Amino acid sequence: MTFLSDPISSIGNWLENFLIGLGLAPNFSALIVTAIGAFVLAAFGLMIVLLLIWFERKAVARMQDRLGPNRIGPYGIFQSVADTLKLLTKEYITPAGADKVVYNLAPLFAVMAVLGIWAVIPFAATVYGSDINVGALYIVAVGAIGVLAIIMAGWSSNNKYALLGAFRVVSQLLCYEVPLVITLLIPVMLAGSMGMNAIVMAQDTWFIFLAPLGFLIFLIASIAEVGRAPFDLLEADSEIVAGFNIEYSGMKFGMFFVAEFLHAFTIGAVVATLFLGGWRGPGAETYPILGTIYFFIKAFIVYFIVVWARGTFPRIRIDQMLNFSWKFLTPLALVLLIVMAVQLKLVEGSPTWVYVTSSFAVNVLIAFGTIHLLRSFARRERKRVSEERPLATAPESDFQQI
Amino acid sequence: MSPLEIFFIFSAGITLVAAAMVVTARNLVHSAWWLILTLFGVAVLFALLNASFFAVIQVVIYIGAISILIIFAIMMTRRVAQDTGPKFNKDWGLAVAVSLFLFGGVTWMLSTWENFNIAPPTMPVDTDPLRQLGQALVSPDAYVLPFELASVLLLAALVGSIIIAWEKK
């Protein structure tokens, strides 16, 4: 019965007992089981990418009134397998003047940075990689390695477009890391802990109801961190060919591709853990396998939103990207964090419904205030743009003051 | 030797080698990569000391922010990143002597310290070092003044950089 309700940890326990039975020291066999668990988790993460690529192609195709892949297997589900095989047989090309070691390390780091996040995400009450007490910060730290991988790829390729792409990536990632980390503090503040398990356990009411605005900012900033449409100007094909990964071929390119898709799904997993109650749901405490199912359903819903945004929005320009982070998301996140800190201190110790409604109300109020501000700003801008100006001005007139 | 000690020696060795490579690598960008490896090694040492918060903060701040800015600055100068001159100047012997003297002194000091073999006190299961650190940083009895001063210093640096970058109207 325990096997049916909690298969993953009972297999782990069985294996550990089996190894101890063979005569291994208990801490050594625990080490072996942990290593196997890490391997299985990583393999699962890489396997799920095949499904994700198929799903995304299919979903975006439907949004654009196409059919998408439909030849290999039912509904074309094995298309990504065929694509992977094709990538595996391709030739590896190293450009002349490339920095060989760095060039080959970059794809590894890209995948590593994404898979590293999975180590702290709890999949069920009993199934998690590691419950470190700084889980939320760990996610930020691992993200830094991802930035590093992209710089490595862009710099070592000895290609102008790759370098330009890397510059764009770094500026975008540094920009959006600020609102991302600030809104990450909101679930931490609500749960009173940075451990991912503690954050999940604190969500008797999902944090999306306590901080809907925080959820939105976090989701937008995360999409920008992956560099997906509408924030895909870092690999904008029409401007800089393919950005940082232009020189990569075969499976080395495939690894960047895998990292991107897996990262998009990882966003879903992180958002589901931080804001949607993680594995929690009816019956998940007694039957951990249910928790895993709930978790993946939630993660997939968020992933679908990311795909949806990709299929719907046009790409933004680089000045819009910078303005949107520094002039809009960052101040908004800061205001939200400070106001919520004060509000949570004020309602400390009051019954749950006061706590929930006041947090929700604070979020809605700030959202309304923001929309009002934006509207008056847009009105002023429209007036300014519609004013008549001389068709051309002498260039000297701009420099008169200096 | 326990597995922890083996791991410590391994990671400390990597850190030292990487640190040496930072100052001897010919290519400035390679130096930066080695610097990142060194800083990562320090993070591993923090993790081995059970200071998970410092380990993560080390990665976030030194690798995620500072090193990336260093690389960013170096990448702007692609053609001059390669150094062709001699690696050492004529005072290298003196430098070796001074650093050996310092290292020997520190080692001697530590070897005379008799508390070496005391096992670290086992903490009660329910202690949360992170919470204690946070409370110490804002409690008037502990470190609130240095903490606030450091914040003011950082704020001043932030304002100063904005003023420097400000477009003159």
Image (tube, rainbow, N blue to C red):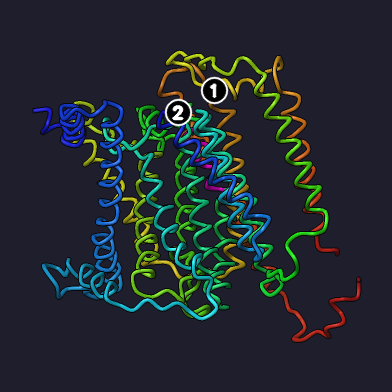
Chain of the residue under the numbered disc 2 shown in the image: A
Q: Chain letter of disc 1?
A: B
A65 in magenta: no
Residue ID at (73%, 78%): A388
Q: Quadrant of the C terminus of chain A?
A: bottom right
A15 or A346, which is in the foreground? A15
Seen from the viewer's position, the closer of residues B114 and A394 is B114
Q: Is residue A220 above or below residue A30?
A: below
Q: Position of residue A23 (x, y in %)?
A: 19, 27
What number is the disc on residue B131?
1
Q: Which mark is residue A191?
A: 2
Q: Quadrant of residue A354?
A: top left
Q: Is residue A368 in sight in this rendering? A: no
**Real-space Cα distance between discs 2 and 1?**
13 Å
What's the magenta region?
A: A179-188
| Label 1 crowd bin: few (<14), some (14–19), many (20+), radius 10 Å | few
